[in-house]
């Protein structure tokens, strides 16, 4: 698996916009288009941990499922 900085950048952006669910949703949709399949799987795992305790963001997890 080659390392791509876009994955790390995506996580940083999602952390920054997590206070606004509509922006979070928008960025998650962009990530779903731009990331490779294995990166989406890594992002999915990270999102489950990140959204723990943030119930307003949990509905958006279906975007990457």
Image: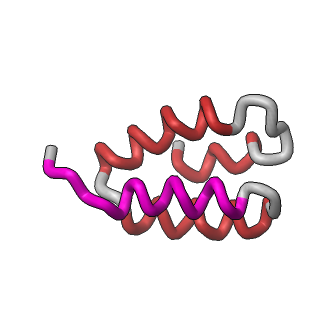
* For residue 2, above or below residue 13: above
Q: Is residue 42 magenta?
A: no
Q: Which residue lies furthest to the right in this view?
A: 56
At 57% from the left and 63% from the top, the residue drawn is 13
Q: In this view, does 30 lie to the left or right of 63?
A: left
Q: If the image is split into quadrants, where does the N terminus sit?
A: top left
At 80% from the left and 31% from the top, the residue drawn is 53
At 65% from the left and 69% from the top, the residue drawn is 26
Residues in magenta, as a range: 2-17
The secondary structure making up most of the magenta span is helix
Image position, residue 41 (x, y; %): 39, 39
* For residue 2, above or below residue 55: below
Q: Does the magenta stretch include residue 16?
A: yes
Q: How many labels does the image show?
A: 0
The residue nearer to you, when weighing 16 against 37, is 16
At 53% from the left and 48% from the top, the residue drawn is 64
* For residue 34, above or below residue 43: below
Q: Is residue 59 left or right of residue 31?
A: right
């Amino acid at each position: 698996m080659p390392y791509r900085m876009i994955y790390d950048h995506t996580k940083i952006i999602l952390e920054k916009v997590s206070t606004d669910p509509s922006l979070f949703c928008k960025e998650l949709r962009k990530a779903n288009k731009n990331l490779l399949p294995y990166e989406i799987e890594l992002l999915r795992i990270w999102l489950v941990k990140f959204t723990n305790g943030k119930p307003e963001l949990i509905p958006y997890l279906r975007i990457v499922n």
